[in-house]
Image (spheres, rainbow, N blue to C red):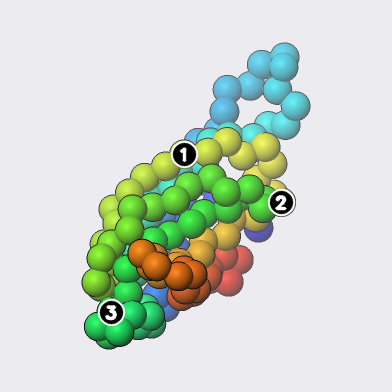
């Protein structure tokens, strides 16, 4: 995926903003494509129900190049969570960075239920 300097993403279910901040270049910098990826997870709508009450307890997991970089707060009893959370992570090369967002249903007992996934490449 090519991460653009500022990119707002809206899929059918998820809303997030990506911002790449170019890092300072000096003699130690290997790639001028490196930087800091700033992500704002706004919310989601229309998530599937995973609980008996007809709702879900969703949380979001972000992976960059297969490595977990962020886990959101769990939002209880909703199909349209509003997280409004931010995080930053370093990006070594933005031309081949693979960002993946998964949304899961949290359960006190038993296994967590997968709700949806999204990659900016799909937008």
Closer to viewer: mark 3 or mark 2: 3
Q: Residue at x 25, y 83 (%)?
A: 53
Closer to viewer: mark 1 or mark 2: 1
Tags 1 and 2 in contact by the CB under 8 Å rule? no
Residue 72 picture location, percent across and down:
38, 52
Q: Earlier in the sequence, mark 3 or mark 2?
A: 3
Give the Cα separation between the discs numbered 3 and 2: 36 Å
Residue closest to the eye, 74 or 96: 74
Q: Residue at x 36, y 64 (%)?
A: 108
Give the Cα separation between the discs numbered 3 and 1: 30 Å
Q: Residue at x 57, y 28 (%)?
A: 23
Q: Give the residue number, with chain letter if any, for mark 2.
A: 96
Q: Earlier in the sequence, mark 3 or mark 1?
A: 3
Residue sitting at the far front: 109
Residue 65 picture location, percent across and down:
67, 51
Q: Which disc number belongs to residue 55? A: 3
The kind of secondary structure element at disc 1 is strand
Q: Give the residue number, with chain letter if any, for mark 1.
A: 88
Give the Cα separation between the discs numbered 1 and 2: 18 Å
Tags 3 and 1 in contact by the CB under 8 Å rule? no
Q: Which disc number belongs to residue 70? A: none
Q: Earlier in the sequence, mark 1 or mark 2?
A: 1
Residue 104 picture location, percent across and down:
45, 67
Q: Is residue 20 above or below residue 110?
A: above
The kind of secondary structure element at disc 2 is helix
């Amino acid at each position: 995926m090519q991460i653009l300097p500022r990119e707002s993403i809206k899929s059918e279910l998820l809303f997030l903003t990506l911002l790449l901040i170019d890092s300072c270049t000096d003699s130690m910098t290997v790639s001028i494509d490196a930087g800091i990826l700033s992500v704002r997870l706004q919310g989601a709508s229309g998530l599937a129900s995973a609980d008996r009450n007809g709702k879900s307890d969703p949380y979001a997991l972000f992976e960059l190049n297969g490595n977990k970089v962020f886990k959101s707060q769990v939002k209880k009893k909703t199909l349209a969570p509003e997280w409004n959370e931010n995080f930053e992570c370093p990006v070594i090369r933005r031309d081949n960075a693979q960002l993946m967002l998964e949304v899961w249903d949290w359960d006190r007992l038993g296994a967590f239920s997968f709700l949806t996934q999204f990659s900016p490449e799909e937008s």
